[in-house]
Amino acid sequence: MIELVSKAVESLLDFVRDARPENIRVVRSAHSLLLSGLSPVNDVLKPRAAFILGIRHRDGGWSDPEETAWAISVISQLAGEKKETIKKAENWLNSVRHPGGGWGRHPRDQVRIPTTALVIALVPSVATDLDRGWVRQAWEKDMASPVQLSYKGGFYLLTVDRETSDANDPLVTSTIAHLAKDQNDDGGFGPWKGHPIGSDPWSTGVVLWGLSKWIDRVDPQVIEKALDWLEKTQLPSGYWPYHYLDEGTSYALIGAVSAMRAMENRK
């Protein structure tokens, strides 16, 4: 598994060093690299701080709530304190929160579980009970529908505050059980079990990320099978096959590192 992480780190380092893509792809990749243990003073990551800060909008945020959340997470590590910059970005997130809680892909979009969960997970300082409550209600509704998207379950688990939630929260319990049953036979996760596209690194990464927060309540075999799937499907380049290689690889790396650390701490 160590090789899995090191290969992904090398591929994303090359991506951050050489590419000039949209900022969200830079900050998402940088976050996964920092999570994997790469030093904030790394000679590839450190120069990116000026680039990220340089395209911040006058209102304090970046292009949308998701990009802003990734950027806050990265800048807080790469650019030292930068308290004023981070505070302005947090204020912008607060200003574009939906009246009922949560965030969409942009301020005029409907509220969405993935976007709201990312903001809560990456910038917990702006998360409110209203935001967490919206995600819970949305996921409860999805759980009662004919199809439950596995990645939404993973995102939901990221939003629950373990310190204040009921230890026997039935929705957390049912979500963990659902994800275990929704795992594909090959060990990975797709939008749902048996989906035509099969398992993919993005869904697998999100589910592992969410389950890692509740590792003491998860069957270790679920984690091990998903990690094995990631190991078997990683390309020689270090990426995982996905529409955007860097996106699938970033989520796969975040999920793998989060799960591996959680499993180690569980021992």
Image: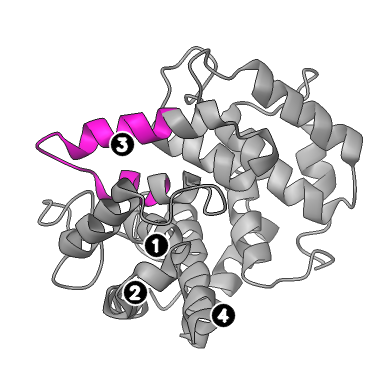
* Magenta: main secondary structure: helix
Mark 3 or mark 1, earlier in chain: 3
Q: Residue at x 59, y 29 (%)?
A: 65
Disc 3 marks which amino acid?
A: Trp
Image mark for residue 211: 1
Query: How many neighbours does mark 3 have within 10 angstroms: few (below 14), some (14-19), or many (20 or more)?
Result: many
Q: Nearer the viewer, mark 2 or mark 3?
A: 3
Query: How many neighbours does mark 4 have within 10 angstroms: few (below 14), some (14-19), or many (20 or more)?
Result: few
Q: Which residues are magenta?
A: 134-155
Mark 4 or mark 1, earlier in chain: 4
Helix, strand or loop at mark 3: helix
Q: Residue at x 43, y 22 (%)?
A: 111
Helix, strand or loop at mark 4: helix
Front-most of residues 102 and 37: 102
Give residue 23's position: percent from left, percent from top.
64, 40
Q: Residue at x 82, y 58 (%)?
A: 46
Helix, strand or loop at mark 1: helix
Image mark for residue 223: 2
